[in-house]
Image (cartoon, rainbow, N blue to C red):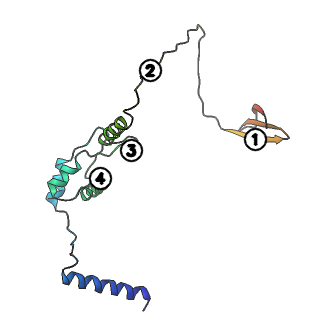
Amino acid sequence: MWPWEEIKKSITGRITRLRNNGTLKYYSKKVWTTQEIEAIIANIQFDENGYVSNYPALAQLVNKRVTQVQTKVARLRREGRINVNADRTKTSVKSKEAMNKFNDARFAQYKKEEKPVPEKVAQTNVKVETQSKVVQMIMTVVVAGNEKTINFFSMEGELLAVKKEAIE
């Protein structure tokens, strides 16, 4: 018998004795009922960025902890029963408000200066036209002494540009 098997048996026996004494409380894993799942789906609310905005209310509704409800909502999203997904490029509205409240309190001693940005408009009578293309090219870098030369070639081998730089 391996040592970790003996350790496992020892720990299991200890847990059993503590539960029988009443020292250790036994927690059974409770399965979510269909009524609880339907209540969550029916009462879930999202903010403008797709984040759930009422986790505490949902937890109180189904009599579970907030973390349990968060895990269940994530699982329901993966299963496709909740179709609204959070926009991961943005933060939730509640956390943004909390961050702004913290920043306002933290930096209350400093004056907020709102400087208007002057609009710069160049007036010219030259017609400007731009074109964009995706171009594949080959770049070669040659270092000789104190000079670095960068050559840009097209895929056909035609020299497009040369850039020379002094190395310090």
Q: Nearer the viewer, residue 126 or 57?
A: 57
Report how far apart the C-alphas of labels 1 and 2 lie in the structure.
46 Å
Contact? badges 2 and 3 (CB < 8 Å): no
Residue 152 placed where, x, y %? Answer: 73, 35
Disc 4 or 3, which lies upstream in sequence? 4
Looking at this view, name the residue that lies furthest to the bottom: 1
Contact? badges 1 and 3 (CB < 8 Å): no
Between marks 1 and 3 in the image, the one whose residue lies nearer the viewer? 3
Q: Secondary structure at mark 1?
A: strand
**Amino acid type, mark 2:** Lys
Looking at this view, name the residue that lies furthest to the front: 109
Q: Which residue is mark 4?
A: 77
**Amino acid type, mark 3:** Arg
Report how far apart the C-alphas of labels 4 and 1 lie in the structure.
49 Å
Where does the C terminus fall, quadrant-wise?
Answer: top right
Q: Residues within 10 Å of mark 4 (few under 14, many from 20)?
A: some
Q: Secondary structure at mark 4?
A: helix
Q: Secondary structure at mark 2?
A: loop
Between marks 4 and 3 in the image, the one whose residue lies nearer the viewer? 3
Q: Residues within 10 Å of mark 3 (few under 14, many from 20)?
A: few
Residue 113 placed where, x, y %? Answer: 42, 24
Q: Residues within 10 Å of mark 2 (few under 14, many from 20)?
A: few
Q: Which residue is mark 3?
A: 88
Report how far apart the C-alphas of labels 2 and 3 lie in the structure.
31 Å
Q: Which residue is mark 2?
A: 115
Looking at this view, name the residue that lies furthest to the top: 125
Q: Which residue is mark 1?
A: 140
Disc 2 or 3, which lies upstream in sequence? 3
Contact? badges 2 and 4 (CB < 8 Å): no
